[in-house]
Image (cartoon, rainbow, N blue to C red):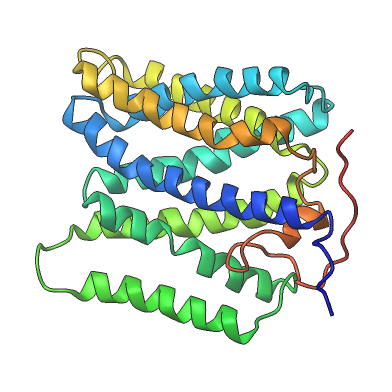
């Protein structure tokens, strides 16, 4: 008996998984670029202001090129801007302050506790169920973190570790709340609004703090700051020709990694909204 050809959902599944992998790699590069920016003379506020000031117009341009549209209604727009200006801004501030105190690898590893925390939060909220594979993955994830933190060697800055853990905890709340608040919004449009909100917060912080840590840095520092914004944009480029699935769509949730999705596996699916 011959196996039937894969259905229409097979290609989006592969694309979704590929985007998750590329996104994780891009996210992991933030710590490396951040260290380079610090070494070149930029401060925490300077790095974040530069990153989001470049990323926001880039994402808006991507939305326009993709003909996704920026009109979402004032209530939704304000919700998205607040999610970026408060929710994401706080997470980024915690992470990049941790990065200033502890090695890049350790900071990134602490942040990546959030998939396990999101899974635990989703189960507690009744949005997801645990299975053996998920429990095993969570156990391995937590064991890896504990192993790295417990290895002998360079003494870690306690404040830096605490900031890294706080970053993971805050990001967990951001994802769980964001999944609810962003339901029904095009993901690329949502990213543009969230990034714009974060840019507003950090540019305002740069004005309050003053030029210290923002001007007079080495060219390599500015290049690293811009790279953090551009890599984020490059991750979204495949979406320009992809399905226009809104955030919170059961189809999108179905192709997420089990570690990150907070939706039950048996959620009903629906067809693509691509036109």
Q: Is residue 183 above or below residue 242?
A: below
Q: Nearer the viewer, residue 209 or 218?
A: 218
Horizontal and vertical percent position of residue 65: 70, 18
Residue depicted at x 31% and y 32%: 44
Residue depicted at x 54% and y 37%: 235
Residue depicted at x 30% and y 21%: 223
Q: Nearer the viewer, residue 142 or 242?
A: 242
Horizontal and vertical percent position of residue 218: 18, 18
User: Which residue appears farthest toward the front when viewing the image?
Assistant: 1
* Left or right of 6 in this view: 268: right
- Quadrant for the N terminus in the image: bottom right
* Left or right of 83 in this view: 2: right
Q: Is residue 243 above or below residue 203?
A: below
Which quadrant of the figure has residue 111? bottom left
User: Which residue appears farthest toward the bottom when viewing the image?
Assistant: 132
Q: Is residue 152 above or below residue 228?
A: below
- Quadrant for the C terminus in the image: top right
Q: Nearer the viewer, residue 8 or 83?
A: 8
Horizontal and vertical percent position of residue 28: 39, 48
Which quadrant of the figure has residue 262? bottom right
């Amino acid at each position: 008996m011959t196996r039937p050809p894969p259905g229409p959902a097979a290609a989006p599944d592969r694309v979704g998984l590929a985007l998750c992998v590329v996104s994780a790699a891009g996210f992991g590069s933030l710590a490396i670029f951040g260290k380079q920016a610090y070494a070149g003379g930029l401060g925490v506020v300077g790095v974040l202001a530069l990153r989001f000031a470049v990323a926001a117009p880039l994402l808006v341009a991507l939305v326009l090129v993709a003909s996704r549209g920026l009109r979402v209604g004032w209530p939704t727009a304000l919700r998205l801007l607040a999610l970026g200006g408060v929710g994401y801004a706080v997470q980024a501030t915690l992470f990049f302050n941790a990065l200033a105190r502890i090695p890049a690898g350790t900071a990134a590893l602490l942040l990546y506790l959030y998939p396990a925390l999101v899974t635990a939060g989703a189960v507690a909220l009744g949005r997801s169920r645990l299975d053996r594979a998920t429990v095993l993955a969570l156990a391995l994830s937590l064991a890896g973190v504990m192993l790295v933190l417990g290895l002998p060697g360079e003494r870690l800055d306690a404040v830096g570790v605490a900031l890294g853990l706080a970053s993971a905890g805050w990001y967990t709340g951001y994802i769980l709340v964001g999944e609810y608040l962003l339901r029904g919004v095009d993901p690329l449009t949502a990213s543009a609004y969230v990034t714009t909100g974060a840019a507003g917060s950090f540019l305002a912080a740069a004005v309050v703090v003053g030029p210290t840590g923002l001007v007079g840095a080495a060219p390599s520092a500015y290049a690293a700051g811009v790279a953090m914004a551009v890599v984020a944009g490059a991750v979204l480029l495949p979406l320009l020709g992809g399905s226009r699935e809104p955030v919170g769509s059961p189809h999108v949730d179905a192709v997420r990694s089990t570690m990150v999705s907070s939706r039950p596996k048996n959620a009903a699916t629906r067809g693509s909204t691509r036109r």
